[in-house]
Amino acid sequence: MTAAVTDTAGKPGSKGFSIRAIMREAGIGLALIGLIIVFSLASEHFLTANNITNILTQITINLILAVGMTFVILIGGIDLSVGSVLALAAVVAGKAISMPGLGPAEAIALAVLAAMVAGTLCGILNGVVSAWWGLPSFIITLGMLNIARGAALQISDARTIYSFPVEFNNFGSLTVWGLPVVFLVALGLALVAWLVLSRTVFGRLIYGLGNSEEAVRLAGHSVFWLKVAAFTICGFTAGIAAIIYMARLNIASPIAGSGFELNAIAAVIIGGTSLSGGRGSVLGTLLGAFIIGVLANGLILLGLSDFMRQMITGVVIIVAVILDHYRAKLTKG
Amino acid sequence: MKFTKFVTAAAVSLMMAAGGASADEKKPVVGLVMKSLANEFFKDMLEGAKEHEAKRGDYVLKAVGMKNESDIESQINAVENFITQGVDAIVIAPADSRAMVPPLKRAMEAGITVINFDVSLDPKAKEQNGVELAFVGPDNRGGAKLAGEALAAKLGKGAKVVILEGNPGADNALQRKLGFEDAIKEGGLELLDSRTAHWETEEANTVATNMLTAHPDIQGIMAANDSMAIGVVKALESAGKAGEIQVVGFDNIPAVGPMLKDGRLLATVDQFGRDMAANAIDQALEVVKGAPEPQGWVKTPIELVTGN
């Protein structure tokens, strides 16, 4: 039974599937390369070291959120609350970091911990409520979207929290060989997520859950805890994203992150992960986040208006889903 | 026996309640309709209004806010609720300068004094609905021009600048953009690019960074609010250009205090949001007491704020 589950999972473990999996990502990778070529030809500023550093910084938060979102979408769920949870985690961390009588190192450590705990707790709540009562995560996380936003506004009294230790801010703009450290954090998270999903039993079960909940249940695994785990991971990544947000901008705003959930979902979908669950990968999500970031950056360099940028991003999302439709047919046949 | 006792008691308490109400009726009721209380600016405004109510003590304040800046529906409902409650005056910062005209007309027809503050109602929409209503509020365009002029004075003629706009479609966003453009024209500056960052810090950070890449010769950046100015300052710090490129903002929120002090932000504009609702309420109470309605545009103070 377990074998049957993992086989339909389409994870790149066995040989046949790894080729198909590569095929999946190859298409998205080619699209990204195409974009990069077009923008390089159109703007002399695009393919410069500085601009590459900028793009990497700019996709960091979305990449982190999208990695967590991948787990939830793989089990056939969705998390609409990540943007609000990011704001709540940031505000909680902002309160922690500005507590009087703390040295910079202690304050930063406390803030990081606070953001991770706040994010994780929201994720656990999302998971437990939707899994226990078997309710659509769409609705539960829509509720959490409002709860977390309201809590962020309540705790901060709707005010931007500012003045963090210099060390914290320096971390936000630190680069190593032109690579922003915050991006390396995101890349590290993506790598861990990829290993977990493709090389562990837990990862196989996440895919399995998206394909057939019944099969996972019959194989003797707890569907409840698997679902809770997926949402918890998603909440945790929102907490991490909150820390990055604070380090980059040196403020914690209760209105931060509105709409981030849709960008994260878009990255996952463009990356070829199926909204009905069971198919997709973190590598795809990484490429999806790159496509969104490169588009946003390149279209500004070309001097295109913001409205055009919105329209083009929308078209890319739809085209990605249509391509995925055909790809799913091809790999089945 | 018991029943008559009960009826008497009920009648007495009813009379007392009525008596209480008539004593309270001497105090006019002012309905304050604001925009998003998630926005510090309106939060401040509400607190200012509450302090004002406590200080004056001769009116009752009922305040309503909204979820977000574009939540027009809630504002219309709030106005209609105030009409039903029969308040004496409605003081409103409209979420939409056109959509709010018809409900306010109904309020005026119900004999309620209406004062429009913060954002002016659209003159055309007023004319179409046959409404005559003064506007009590700041000159957003003039304020943005002040900030723009400060930038022009610092940079000199021919300097290259960009604008970060507020939400497309919002009247104050448009007015501030026009004000910046006035200053650019008069100061002989060159405008390289102008685009929205939706009033938001993170987006402003990204947009400003990308603008710097597209136009490495930018010398000044005008942001239509301080939240965006913070994002711009962070972008300059990351690019190693803090202090080289001048930034101006708008609103004078507390978070930009340190930036003004050390020169990372050249200037911002204060429109005294804390007093704005209170001033409008004063106007409304005058009219309720029998003073003539204000005419045209009653301008409220604005001030350029710099580090020194």
Image: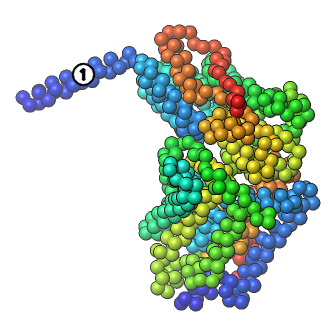
The chain letter for the residue carrying disc 1 is B
Q: Is residue A214 left or right of residue A55?
A: left
Query: What residue do we see at 76% from left, 34% from top?
Result: B177
Q: Position of residue B296 (x, y in %)?
A: 66, 16
Q: Position of residue A308 (x, y in %)?
A: 80, 50
Q: Is residue A279 left or right of residue A153?
A: right
Q: Position of residue B287 (x, y in %)?
A: 52, 13
Rendered position, A116 above or below A10: above
Query: What residue do we see at 67% from left, 66% from top?
Result: A186
Query: What residue do we see at 44% from left, 21% from top?
Result: B55
Q: Position of residue A7 (x, y in %)?
A: 62, 87
How is the model colour-coded? rainbow
Q: What's under tag 1, amino acid-wise?
A: Met
Rendered position, B196 above or below B62: below
* Snapshot quadrant of residue B298: top right
Secondary structure of the residue carrying numbered label 1: helix
Rendered position, A66 above or below B21: below
Q: Residue furthest top?
A: B291
Query: In this orientation, does residue A96 appear?
Result: yes
Q: Residue furthest left?
A: B1
* Snapshot quadrant of residue B301: top right
Query: What residue do we see at 61% from left, 66% from top?
Result: A69
In this figure, which residue is indicated by the disc labeled 1? Answer: B16
Query: In this orientation, does residue A73 appear?
Result: no
Q: Is residue A39 left or right of residue A223?
A: right
Figure label count = 1
The C terminus of chain A - image quarter: bottom right
Which of B229/A125 is in front?
Answer: B229
Which of B31/B145 is in front?
Answer: B145
Rendered position, A153 above or below B109: below
Number of other residues with Cα within 10 Å of mark 1, as a class: few under 14, some 14 to 19, many 20 or more: few
